Amino acid sequence: MTDILDDLAWRGLIAQSTDLDALRASMAKGPITVYSGFDPTAPSLHVGHFVPLLTLRRFQLAGHRPIGLVGGATGLIGDPSGRNTERSLNSSEIVAEWVERLRGQVGRFLDFDAQPNAALMVSNLDWTGELSAIDFLRDIGKHFPVNRMLAREAVSARLSGEGLSYTEFSYQILQSNDYLELFRRYDCTLQIGGSDQWGNITAGADLVRRIEGGHVHALTLPLITKADGTKFGKTAGGALWLDPAMTSPYAFYQYFLNADDRDVIHYLKVFTFRSREEIEALEKAVAERPFAREAQRMLAEDLTELLHGRQELDAVVAASKALFGQGALEELPAATLEAALAEVPKAKVGELGATFVDLLADSGLVESKSAARRAVKEGGAYLNNVKITDEAYAPSACDLLAGRFLVLRRGKKSIGGVEVG
């Protein structure tokens, strides 16, 4: 059961730990219980949450018991970590709705029927909601030296800027109390989270020691970065969400399919369950055949299937191929086609009537009408994967896909679209 620590180290998934040797010794005695928390600060988790989610799953596969904690209480407060300004507080009704959404997302990655290490799902509102202000201050707050709390990077950074409310200042105490409660209720002895949570997690471990005399552990995971300096998980449209209504399966797939060669092996280690041998073989393929993009395909397929299921994976792979002339566009579901065209240059028109040349230019696929005419003349312009050779051709209703879309292509790789209506 301690092999998971070696696997996490190889995958680059250990940023900080209170004492790895002590944790290894504890795990050598038998299964432990480990938890990670997820606050409902939005209606969906984003791709950055994959790191702790999949690490919980790795622990469960190694025989340990995972707990997914959704912050029904801490979501009402807001963590100041990584923020320069005070959070806007959401209503209790919104937070409650988001808690239920996150429960479903976290639950996709854990096995609640596995024996003897079935996963648990909890909300910290279950114990924090019953805690009076007096009990909070007397029983919990007295164990937190203010000077130590002020020294935390997240706090000191805010104090030197716009300041920090007592509400957000108290967040560390609330999260620490979660660890104490999970230790008491489920003998939980390991909390994991992002490296920006180190102060909160170690504060919780210290609270367990002070009140219960228990020796528990903290382990943080690195925040993922991109080799080109841009923020991981960000797209032109915003964050990469796990909810398919907020980020389509097609956009999710394309994000990882387009991973930089410098990043893809790291992503395979962090986000997939492929073995060391498989990943090393893919690393060799990247070095020897980068044009084939084998590693990127494996990464995109593994993650899309993991999050959205095999049926959605098959649909987005079919769409990706069909857009480039390797499949039938007519067979694509309307939702998948719409999601695919949302990722390319696209024009929206009220009705048909414009020529193909006009639509090429209006979509932004070419820089001008003269460039569009040139593309047609040179045999490099396509409508729904059919080569167009007549500059005066005007698409009609029979050309529409799913009743409202046209797919434009220039050459082999440049895709655009038109939406009618």
Image: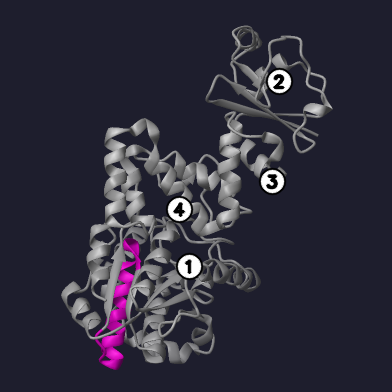
Q: Nearer the viewer, residue 130 or 61?
A: 61
Q: CA distance from mark 1 to mark 3?
A: 25 Å
Residue at image point 26% right, 68% down: 151
Q: CA distance from mark 3 to mark 2?
A: 22 Å
Which badge, 1 or 4, is on the more N-terminal residue? 1
Q: Mark 4 is on which residue type?
A: Asp
Mark 3 or mark 2, whichever is nearer to me: 3
Residue at image point 40% right, 45% down: 231
Label 2: element kind = helix
The quadrant of the rendering that contains the C terminus is top right
Kindly indicate whether the residue at mark 4 contacts the one at mark 2 (C-beta within 8 angstroms). no
x%, y% of residue 343?
Answer: 58, 37
Q: Mark 3 is on which residue type?
A: Ala
Task: Residue under label 3, please give it.
Answer: 335
Label 3: element kind = helix
Q: Is residue 339 positioned above or below 111 on the image?
A: above
Label 1: element kind = loop
Task: Residue under label 4, please give it.
Answer: 302
Q: Mark 1 is on which residue type?
A: Phe
Kindly indicate whether the residue at mark 3 contacts the one at mark 1 (C-beta within 8 angstroms). no
Local packing at callout 4 (Cα closer than 10 Å; few below 14, some 14-19, many 20+) is many
x%, y% of residue 280?
Answer: 26, 48
The quadrant of the rendering that contains the N terminus is bottom left
Residue at image point 53% right, 22% down: 412
Mark 4 or mark 3, whichever is nearer to me: 4
Write down the region rendered in magenta. 193-215
> Quick check: can you spot residue 226?
no
Task: Residue under label 1, please give it.
Answer: 109
> Quick check: can you spot residue 45?
yes
Image quadrant where residue 114 sits: bottom left
Q: CA distance from mark 4 to mark 3?
A: 21 Å
Task: Residue under label 2, please give it.
Answer: 359
